[in-house]
Structure formats: structure tokens, C-alpha cells
Image: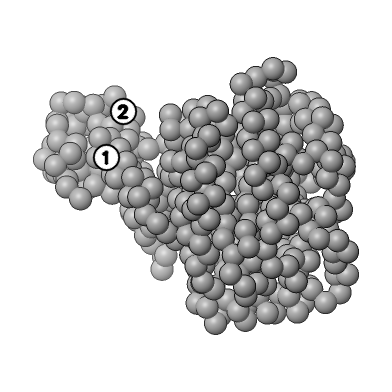
Amino acid sequence: MSNLDLFNSKSDPIPQIRPDVDVIPINNNGDSYLYFHDIRGYVPSDFALDRSAGVILFLLDGRKSINDLQAYLGNGITTDILLEYVQFLDENRLLHSPHYKNHADEIEQKYEKSPIHQSVTAGGSYPSDTNELLAFLDEAFANYGADSGNSASNPVKALYAPHIDPRIGMKTYVESFQVLRQMKPGRVVILATSHYAGLHAKVYQNKPFIVSNKNFETPLGTIPADRDAIDFLAGDAEIMGLSTHDRAHRIEHSIELHLLFLSYIWQHDYSVIPILVGGFDELFYMDETNLGKQIDTFSKFLRNQFGQNDDTLFLISGDLAHVGKKFGDNRPAAAMKNEVELFDEQFLTAAKNGSTQNMLKLMKHDYDPYRICGFPPLYTFLKAFPDLKGQTISYDRWNQTEAESAVTFGSILYE
């Protein structure tokens, strides 16, 4: 990748440090560093600076030039040295600059052209080595699967399950996915929370649904996309608010975690239609919206094309409440426990009863006060199948004590 677009002026304002990069102080062998975590993956994964660099980073506010900064620095730091250092930051995509934007666009376009989605969770949330992963999952299913008592008495239509880190929610994953173990559908339609569509706001304006035609890689094998069905779906993309620009899938975990467990419990051949669902906040403020019409149209399409097919399983990927100081509340999660559990119970009851009206009414109250990330994909599914009833399989809570925060999650089986 060319560096011809690096910042190269002593008089122009230096681009500011990217606000979407987390700067984390760390210590290593007695030395102090600033580690940079970029959720988008544009900054090199192992990039860190000596903690003393914080002085310079603080000054890069998007208004000061190299010449302006010279007065803040010690003797011996020339404008040439400072420009070289700024270019070093720019080369590593820390600055909100033309170089960063060009790099980002190249990365996203490369992903969209690729036929493969490579896992972003393997090696972190679970082992990337196949044998280690099998041992990891064998142990989990042995520990949690035998005594759960969950089983399906009728053909399963859908499963709503979390996408929380398996190291935290393994019990719920096992209790949920083992119910599907005896199934052999040829197609799986996945409706999943999109956490990152907002990073590409212009691309997804008025496009709440994002489909990918990529094959998904897991350490247990590659799961093919149902490209014929996806192409057919894309034929009515405009009226349904569907985007085929799938860059929102690149760093997303909500689909591949479900596919990980399918890869473990199933040995037969099947294909997937992976669809991310963006935020539905507009529904909380207005009764008649273009978004509402898009949801109705898209849901009707799902029902008409896949709803009567016994060879199709629906997976809905979403967690429940996100509360506490980490998520913007002024109270610790522990102080909200009772009210959150009551809200979750009401949400799950509406979901089990297939009542989109009650679900939306609940979510409208105080405008989604507990940040239920599973609402958009689950609401979409229930709009497609309004008469479907379900049963709760699991409910749990992850307490992040140090952050005074918590995430709740659960699962529902629809037969």
C-alpha cells in the first residue's frame, strides 16, 4: 500500500487522533506503554507506544500544525523530527487522515470482493486449532448437556440464542444448540444483531438488513452460503431495505458464533443465508415509519419464500440487556438487577407469545432503556411468523464487577 498520501506539511493542521481507537495503558516488564485497540482492525494489532507519547497525542487535536507544536516540545526536537513522528502515526492509521481513509476503503472493498468470511473470534473466544476446539466443546457439552433436559417434541422452526463470548455463556449455548442436534436442514437463515453497521452510516442509510454471500470459515470447516437464494433475495433489495454491501460483516461476531456450534453438532451438508439487522430506534419515536414498512416487506418475503419450507431452520442471534456504567448508566448494574430481570422477563414473554405489539410497546417505554441488542433480529423474525409460539430454554447474566456493568442473555425455541 502506497504511503504517498501520508501527512506532509509543517503549516497545515495535523489530523486529529482517531476517536474510535481505544488507548489502553499497559505495563510490560516494568515499562509503561500505551496500547491502541482498533475494533475496525486498521491499526496493527500489536501497536503500542511508550507512555511518554501521551503528551504529543494530547496535542493532536486537529487544529495545531507542526510549527505550532514545536513550542510545546523540548530542545533538540526539530520540526523535521516531529513531522517524521507524525508520519509514523499516520502510517499506522492512528490519525483521521486521507491515508487512514484510503486504507480503510481498500480494506472494506477487498472484503466485499472476497468469497470468504474469515473468523474474527477463533483464537480469542475459543481455540483456533481444530483438535483443541473439539476438546473444548466436547468438555462443554459433557458438562452442560447431559442434565439440561431440553428437547424438542415437534419439528423446530427457529432458535433465538445469544452471541455472547462462549467463555461466558457456554452453558446457554450448550443447552440451546443441543436441542438441534438431531436436525438435518438443508438451509439455515440467520438473522443477527449488527453491532457495526453504524460505522458505515452512509453505506447503510435506509438499509436495515445486510446480507452476505460469503462462505463462513470456522476451525471445524467452511459453511457455504446459499448463493442462489441470496441472489433471489437481492432481487427485491431496494423495497425491503436490504444491502448487499456486506462490509458490516467483516468484524462481526454475531453470526459466526452460531455457526461454530452448528459445525460442532452437525455433520451433514447445509448452506446459510447470513443477514445482519441494524438498529430499529426509529420505531420507538414514530408510529408510521419507512423503516416499519421495510420490516413488514422483508418479513413477508422471508415468510413467503422460506416459511413453508421444512428444510429451512431460522437462527436469531441476539443478547438481552446491557446495563451499568460501561454502557452509559449512572448506576452500577448491581443496583439495577431486579428491574432488569423484570424487563427481560416481560421481553421474553412477549417473544415466546409471538407478540410483536407487546414487544414494541415494552421497548418504546423509555426508548429501549436497557439496550436489548437482540430486539431487531427477533422482532423481524416474529413479524414474519406472528402465530409462532416458543419456550424459554435458558436465561443467564454476565456480571462485569470491575466495570460495574452486566449483560443478560437467554434463548427461546420455536416449534
Who is closer to the viewer here, 268 or 400? Answer: 268
The x, y position of residue 233, in whole percent, is: 54, 42
The x, y position of residue 325, in whole percent, is: 67, 40
User: The C terminus is located in which quarter?
Assistant: bottom right
Earlier residue among tags 1 and 2: 2
Who is closer to the viewer here, 148 or 72? Answer: 148
Q: Secondary structure at mark 1?
A: helix
The x, y position of residue 377, in whole percent, is: 67, 42
Tell me the CA gap for discs 1 and 2: 18 Å
Which amino acid, by three-letter code, is at mark 2? Gly
Who is closer to the viewer here, 111 or 274? Answer: 274
Query: Hey, which quadrant is residue 177 in on the image?
Result: bottom right
The residue located at (15%, 26%) in the rendering is: 11
Q: Is residue 230 left or right of residue 154?
A: left
Q: Is residue 283 left or right of residue 54?
A: right
The residue located at (31%, 28%) in the rendering is: 62
The residue located at (78%, 73%) in the rendering is: 144
Reply above or below: 320 against 173: above
Kindly report which numbered mark, 1 or 2, lies closer to the viewer in this rendering. 1
Reply above or below: 140 against 105: below
In the rendered structure, find residue 62 and report the number of the disc placed on it.
2
Which amino acid, by three-letter code, is at mark 1? Asn
Q: Which residue is mark 1?
A: 102
Would residue 187 be visible to someone looking at this image?
yes
